[in-house]
Image (cartoon, helix red, strand yellow):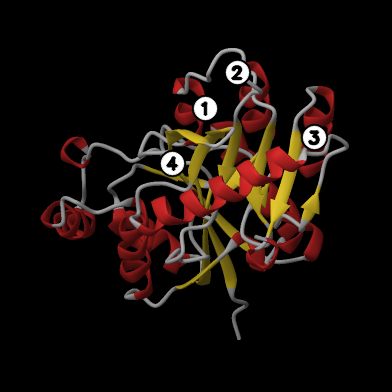
Amino acid sequence: MSVPILGIIAGAGRAPEILVEHCLHKGIPFALCGIAGVTDTHFLECYRGESIPLGQAGKLIQFLKSQNVSDLVLTGALQRPDWNKIQVDARGLRFITHILIKKTLGDDALLRLVREELESEGFRVKGIQDYAPELLAPEGSLSAIHPTNADYKSVKMGWNTAHFHGSQDKGQAVVVQGDTIIGFEDKSGTDALIDKVTPFMNQRGPILVKACKPQQDRNLDLPTIGPNTVQRCADKGFIGIGIEAGATLIIDKEKVIDLCNQNNLFLLSLSSNSI
């Protein structure tokens, strides 16, 4: 009997590399597929990954089935493309036609459609946390820098606002300063949100708050922070980051915490029970 293979569809960033490292450590056989122009080519070459252009859904499915893939993990960053400019094969055309018919799809709705398409081909979509649960943020104050009582109240307000914002499938993050929300994440992503906010002068700096959308498919696109998130916040004069415990992925956790400590940023991880 053939051995089931884990399919990894990799975007950009460290998350796919971490999943591959875990598979190697735990002896889980995998087939790696990257997205042309998005996934690091050296990473794909190291692990004999296949590079497939976005829109070539038929080629992707054929590759996965040829590798005896049963379970799939989609992980890594991928910016929303211009669907009208993608070169597609017949299978990809069917999928993109569904998207173009529903022009107002938010990210969560779009990912659910991706999942439905993959599962219609017999694959089971899993989350990266099923294989690397230690990536999930534990609850508590994770850095040596701790929030003040006022900061804690700001994070709680940001948490509630982020959940409401997410319930409308508009984004996972907000920026709060004092008792004012000064930025909302949109389709441009968290990095763009951090870069574009203009904090109030002569006040204690802002705080980034990320939370899982209430309707989020937790096997797809969990809120994520990594060293780049921390450094961006530090460069913009932020004082802290608030995240959702058990529902946020921390990439390179030790480095994230070290960077928070070096830049006097608190990292506070809260659950619904502590709000």
Q: Residue at x 48, y 49 (%)?
A: 162
Judge left or right: residue 259 versus residue 150: right
Q: Nearest the camera: 76 or 248? A: 248
Q: Earlier in the sequence, mark 1 or mark 3?
A: 1
Judge left or right: residue 216 versus residue 42: left
- Residue identified by numbered label 3: 255
Residue 271 placement: quadrant: bottom right
What element does badge 4 sit on? loop
Q: Is 90 rendered above or below residue 177?
A: below
**Which amino acid, mark 3?**
Lys
- Residue identified by numbered label 1: 194
Q: Residues within 10 Å of mark 2 (few under 14, many from 20)?
A: some
- In the rendered image, residue 20, in percent from the top left (x then y), is placed at 68, 52
- Residue identified by numbered label 2: 236
Q: Residue at x 66, y 23 (%)?
A: 204
Residue, far left: 101
Residues at marks 3 and 4 touching, judged by CB atoms closer than 8 Å: no
Q: Earlier in the sequence, mark 4 or mark 1?
A: 4
What element does badge 2 sit on? loop
Residues at marks 4 and 1 touching, judged by CB atoms closer than 8 Å: no
**Which amino acid, mark 2?**
Lys
Distance, label 4 to label 1, CA atoms, is 18 Å
Residues at marks 1 and 2 touching, judged by CB atoms closer than 8 Å: yes
Distance, label 1 to label 2, CA atoms, is 7 Å
Residues at marks 1 and 3 touching, judged by CB atoms closer than 8 Å: no
- Residue identified by numbered label 4: 78
